Amino acid sequence: MSAEATATASPIAPLWGEVRYGGELARLLASREFRSVQKRTDEAPVLLVPGFMAGDGSLRVLRQWLLRRGHRVHMSGFRANVGCAEQLVTRLDEQLHALASETEQRVFLIGQSRGGALVRALAVRNPDAVAGLAMLGSPVTDGLAVAPPVLRTVRWLATLGDLGLPGLFSSSCEYGACCAEFRAALAAPLPDGIGATAMFSYSDAIVDWQACIDPHAEAIAVDSSHCGMSVNVDVYRALGRALDAARTEG
């Protein structure tokens, strides 16, 4: 389904739709495409970044699939993606350049939810080190276009950050100077030569799908829950095409 497909559903679907995760995982594991993937020796290295409040463990199924395709995979090192965006992108910048230097290749970036916004900013800052970009359910045009329970959690964590709890973003990250460079990179056009894919779901119960439509990326609609994008067979098919395109262009 293309981004131009019509939709009459409300921007944020009912929260109960997120219980689909288990079924999406079962469908993926039963898929012949997932189980019989062919390993290549010329695949780009990949940097994986998890979503809001999630850690690297949330992407373990995706990591294993990428390894079986032949990619060298580097994880973000995040225990939970709740830190100041500018500080997180700075950490990822170091990891990106280390991986590119070690492999002598440009790196493909994959981020889920908030992780997609982080890697988009990373790609804008480092075009020469990036082979391609995929954002999975990432609200890149409005980071607060989320379901009310999620927004309440965001505000609560920001309050804790305001009080000085280490490792958390604060209210100033939204409009203050600390994340000004991150916000500028997030809003900037993607550099020429970086193929980008933005996947979204009309039935996403966490993020408003409209906020996931990056005007500088190919928008692809998938039938997925928000959390299930890391284990959804349609997402993997689209990722496979994006990774293949990056290898061909490289």
Image (tube, rainbow, N blue to C red):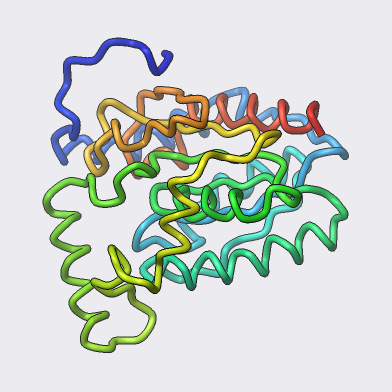
Vertical relation: 10 (above or below) 22: above
How far across and down, in percent of the image, does residue 180 sit? Answer: 41, 64
Relative depth, front residue between 83 and 190? 190
Relative depth, front residue between 20 and 171? 171
How far across and down, in percent of the image, does residue 90 sit? Answer: 56, 70
Q: Residue at x 34, y 63 (%)?
A: 53
The answer to which image quadrant residue 81 occupies is: bottom left
Q: Is residue 217 left or right of residue 153?
A: right
Vertical relation: 27 (above or below) 231: above
Instruction: Check the image and name the residue furthest to the bottom.
Output: 164
Quadrant of the image for the C terminus? top right
Q: Residue at x 28, y 74 (%)?
A: 170
Vertical relation: 88 (above or below) 25: below
How far across and down, in percent of the image, does residue 112 sit? Answer: 45, 47
Quadrant of the image for the N terminus? top left
Q: Residue at x 14, y 26 (%)?
A: 10
Q: Is residue 55 left or right of residue 60?
A: left
Q: Residue at x 21, y 35 (%)?
A: 17
The answer to which image quadrant residue 203 occupies is: top left
